[in-house]
Image (cartoon, rainbow, N blue to C red):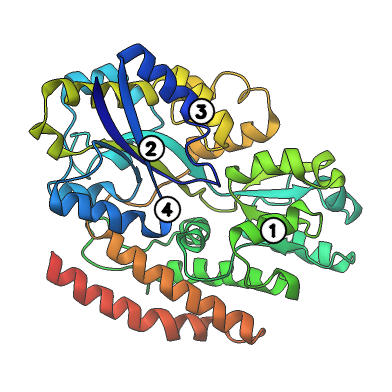
Amino acid sequence: MEELEFSIMSRGDDPVGDLRPLLDQFEAEHRCRIRVKPLIWESGWAELVKVALYGEGPDVSEIGTTWCASLVAMNALRPFTPREVASFGGPSAFLPSSWRTGILPGDDQLWAVPWLADMRVLYYRRDVLEQAGVDEQSAFQSHQHLMQTLDRLRASGVATPWVMATSQASLIGLHNLASWVWGAGGDFVAVDGKRSLLNLPETRAGIRAYLELGQYLSPAARGLSIYQSDALFQEGQAAVALSWPLALVSLRQSAAPPVKANLGAALTPGVTFIGGSNLVVWRHISRFSRAREDLALDLVHFLTGTPAQSAYNLRTSLLPVRPDVLEAPPFVADPLYRTFVQGLKTGRTFPSLPVWGLIEDRLVLALAQLWEDVLARPGQDLDAIIAKHLGPLAQRLDLILAQRS
């Protein structure tokens, strides 16, 4: 019996549970065994770098959408042939934003097949907005609209009008920030990856707008992880939360009754951040039998196909990457899912560059330091804080990127 090792990124206490029914079906149809190896996001990249360096480990892996280009640069991934790409349905079978994360700029070669989509979204209490005299149709149309909404909520006596993750350094914060930077016309790095754009006025304006939201965090809402932030909203202690689709199942199942009865969702101001994960086949699989390689391709085909996308995504609250699934129930009927779908169709991903991992690491640390300064002494000059942290970082990144070009 042929056997494959499949590494996935952990979500929740039982990372394999939601996926197991699909894998059981695949094993029965292909008379094989799939060994699942869960990795955690905090150390997953380091684990996969070891696989790339030593050519040993999983046959198929789930990877973050920004990891593809670095693994390609390490000559670690098996490319998908044109025939295999056609068997997946080709580019038109997937969301354009997701498809682009599996190819390198200026090239059509597919290295990673889109699997799951993530994004940033605002959850809000309809009843609380109504009591404050806020029209939910226009409440979040722009950053200024959002600020006005939060001002009115605070003026109406809401103790915590806004909650979001501002704790330790993590990718969550950078994903949150992206919408505001892109919405202001800024960016983090040039298209060719040869220089940073942190000193652009538009980038600074987007960062400043994002940090302005700190004034609406009550003491209880400061320094929280995204899970703690979601819990505060779920318990009915906040009016608006910056979060992700992953929170929706908990909100609908376990939130306080007033939250469940009045739950609304809106896109973030600016440009919606789209993240998620892809599936890759490792180059080292060619050392084994052709049957094993074919089985790996079959697994990728199975998990990214329409039936599996329909079944798995509803269990996880992560989103499908296939338009045909998004255009069917429950996504077309559920108003919250319709908001998600709109964001997936209009949103944007981080660039697929080999240097992005380096840039991402530095930005995550800088953002954590920014929030530490902003929350420690409210009312400070935000432009001065941004210049203090990002000016030196931009110089360091420019030197590093110039050497790598």
User: In this figure, which residue is indicated by the disc labeled 4?
Assistant: 40
- Cα–Cα gap, marks 1 and 4: 34 Å
In front: mark 4 or mark 3?
4
Looking at the image, which residue sits at the far left? Answer: 287
- Cα–Cα gap, marks 2 and 3: 17 Å
Q: Nearer the viewer, residue 57 or 339?
A: 57
Looking at the image, which residue sits at the far top? Answer: 29
Label of residue 193 in the image: none
Sequence-earlier tag: 2 or 3: 2
In front: mark 1 or mark 4?
4
Residue 239 position within the rendered picture, expressed as x and y whole percent measured from the top left: 78, 56
Q: Nearer the viewer, residue 279 or 100?
A: 279
For label 2, the SS is: helix
Decide: is 242 above or below 252. Answer: below
**Disc 1 residue type?**
Leu
Q: Nearer the viewer, residue 1 or 265?
A: 1
* Mark 3 Cα-neighbour bin, 10 Å: few <14, some 14–19, many ≥20: many
